[in-house]
Amino acid sequence: MDGSFRIGRLFGIPILIHYSFILVIPLFAWIIGSQITITTDMLNEIFQVPVDTTLITTGYIPYLLGTIVALGLFAGVLVHELAHSLVARKKGIRINSITLMIFGGIATMEEGVPDPKAELPMALIGPIASLVVGLVCSGIVYSVPAITTDPAVAGVLIFIFGYLGVLNIILFAFNLLPAFPMDGGRVLRAWLAKRMPLHRATKIAADIGKGFAIIFGLVGLFFFSPFLILIALFIYIGASTESTAVKYSYLLQDVTVGDMMSSPVVAVLQTMPVSQVITMMYSSKHLGFPVVERDTLIGMVTLADVNRITSIDREAMQVRDIMTRDPITLPPTAPVIEALKIMSAHNFGRIPVVHEGKILGIVTRTDIIKVTELKQI
């Protein structure tokens, strides 16, 4: 993930930290530290255990404790994501990395059409892990008298583990909300997918997730909570993005680029003047052409290539001066989903289809959209 750096590996899985994580830790530390008295009263009510505030309210100690709790919370998030990842790996799904970021954590898995049978245990295990961490931390609160007889030190331990216990149990409950793409939403999708096609189940779960996102956003506006508004945006965008991705993956899973490529292809020579290529773009409404030499593909020239030079230079230059050499190509047997991934990753609009060096056709983003629409009939 962009903006992330690696800090180590656990169970063979790379652990990354996003820059937003570094920004949010001081914010969380300040929020927790500035509400130390309110939180202490809350923990007293929840656990019915007296909390000595001699140390926890002294000087900079509240903000130190805030930092410890914030780091502890993200350690719990890491356990949550590790639980997802280990179950996924057991189901044969490759885990690329786990990234800690402003909204918690995200496990990056190999892409493909989700299997509801595998997704259900994967989605449930994360919240269960958070519940276990929360219960363990809560249990430590009641074990503090056996750990120390110093009331001030006991107050510090009760504050840290009591707060982490409450936060992880809240994390457990929050993640089980049926707000796709959160864990509860994935559980809902897995349940729906047993009764209908996957892309329809995903759309229903995503629509419910968007509904929760709107509610979170309105509550965030009412209570002036920027963090809740950001969570609402995260859920809404995530639901929309994944719903679209699953729809394409499901509908195009058996389609190859050879099935939908445009052929024959209008190609240009590397000696063609750039001005003539622009004229061809206007007349054909195509924004890119393969460049061939003796029927062999040697490059691609696109509108982006043309825009990189000035209008004066275009008059004197040929295609070979601006074309992209050694373009990414696909064989006719490649899945359309692979073409779509390459287009998204590199912001391409088209990919040449080549067999043994000869160009057979070209597949465009528009072609994929049209076939997807036809598949929905």
Image (cartoon, rainbow, N blue to C red):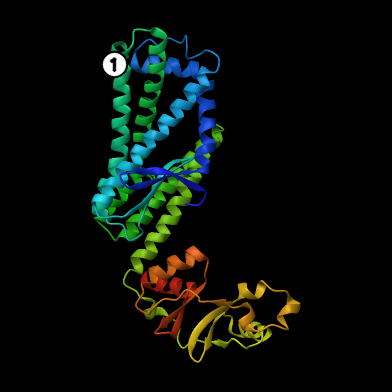
Callout 1, which amino acid? Ser
Q: Which residue is painted at 47% across and 73% down in the image?
A: 328
Q: Is residue 56 above or below residue 307?
A: above
Q: Quadrant of the C terminus?
A: bottom left
The reply, left or right, for residue 158 in relation to residue 291 is left
Farthest residue toward the front?
Answer: 8
Find residue 279 and report its image quarter.
bottom right
Q: Which residue is painted at 44% across and 48% down in the image?
A: 210
Image location of residue 157, percent across then percent down = 38, 17
Image location of residue 133, percent across then percent down = 31, 30
Q: Is residue 266 above or below residue 204?
A: below
Residue 221 visible: yes
Find residue 195 and report its image quarter.
bottom left
Q: Secondary structure at mark 1?
A: helix
Badge 1, how many Cα within 10 Å: few under 14, some, many 20+?
some
Name the residue nearer the viewer: 137 or 219.
137
Q: Which residue is painted at 41% across and 30% down in the image?
A: 72
Farthest residue toward the bottom?
Answer: 294
Residue 287 visible: no
Image location of residue 80, percent across then percent down = 34, 39
**What residue would you read off at disc 1?**
143
Image location of residue 194, percent across then percent down = 24, 55
Name the residue nearer the viewer: 24 or 197.
24
Q: Is residue 268 above or below residue 178?
A: below
| Numbered label tally | 1
